[in-house]
Amino acid sequence: MSRLVYGYFGSKNGLLRFVGHGILATFGAYRRYPAEKPDENQRLVFICSGNICRSPLAEVYARSLGKEASSCGLNCTDGHPADPRARQFAAANGLDLDNHLTVNVTNFEFSENDFIILMEPAHIDDFHRKVGPSHRMALAGAYCSPPNPYIHDPYSCSDEFFSRCERKVMEAVGKLCE
């Protein structure tokens, strides 16, 4: 049972958050953040906690699909490389994260027209506190099948979950960029 939890959800907390946010979504808690398509001229800005696993992969994948994209983190310092497993996963999928360096959301230059894609609902309030509420936003997991607003941070999780999470990120970006 624990192998299933850690391989599929990353941790017990990941399972609880996945289920909890799924229930909240069912009852409309995130209807302000639908899986809508960005306007053609909008830059996609992917945001996660540390800007080393989920958001940098989303950025390079969106760029490979011809979109203007960038990424930053809510709880990181500037100038760190992507996680080695993220670089390895990206390379295995024909993408390159070797030159990625983290950027904290407070040091990122947003434009009025950016479309913000967050990896988990907890990022919404944090983003509003640090940047403000004026941007169009969506939750990445809302683009997955089945949709769930929560994509757990794979940083301290098993390799099995890390790959599963990064596949979910790519699925979300693929749907977003269709």
Image: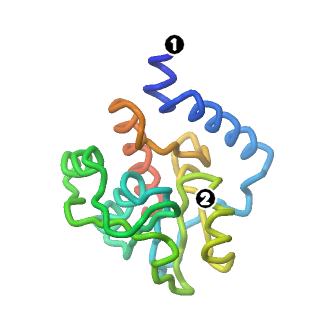
Q: Hey, which quadrant is residue 161 in on the image?
A: top left
Question: On screen, 109 above or below 155?
Answer: below
Query: Mark 2: few, some, or many residues within 10 Å (few <14, many ≥20)?
Result: some
Q: Earlier in the sequence, mark 2 or mark 1?
A: 1
Q: Amino acid at mark 2?
A: His
Residue depicted at x 38% and y 43%: 167
Q: Residue furthest bottom?
A: 112
Secondary element under disc 2, as helix, strand or loop, is helix
Would you say 88 lies left or right of 57 here? left
| Residue labelled with disc 2 | 123
Closer to the camera, 16 or 166? 16
Residue 119 pos. (x, y %): 53, 54
Question: On screen, 91 above or below 34?
Answer: above
The CA distance from mark 2 to mark 1 is 29 Å
Would you say 89 lies left or right of 111 here? left
Residue depicted at x 45% and y 62%: 76
Residue depicted at x 21% and y 46%: 88
Question: On screen, 8 above or below 3?
Answer: below
Q: How is the image coloured?
A: rainbow
| Residue labelled with disc 1 | 1
> Which of the numbered marks, if any, corresponds to residue 159?
none
Residue depicted at x 44% and y 67%: 72
Q: Hey, which quadrant is residue 50 in on the image?
A: bottom left
Give the quadrant of the C terminus.
bottom left
Residue 77 pos. (x, y %): 42, 65
Would you say 50 lies left or right of 84 here? right
Closer to the camera, 81 or 147? 81
Secondary element under disc 1, as helix, strand or loop, is loop
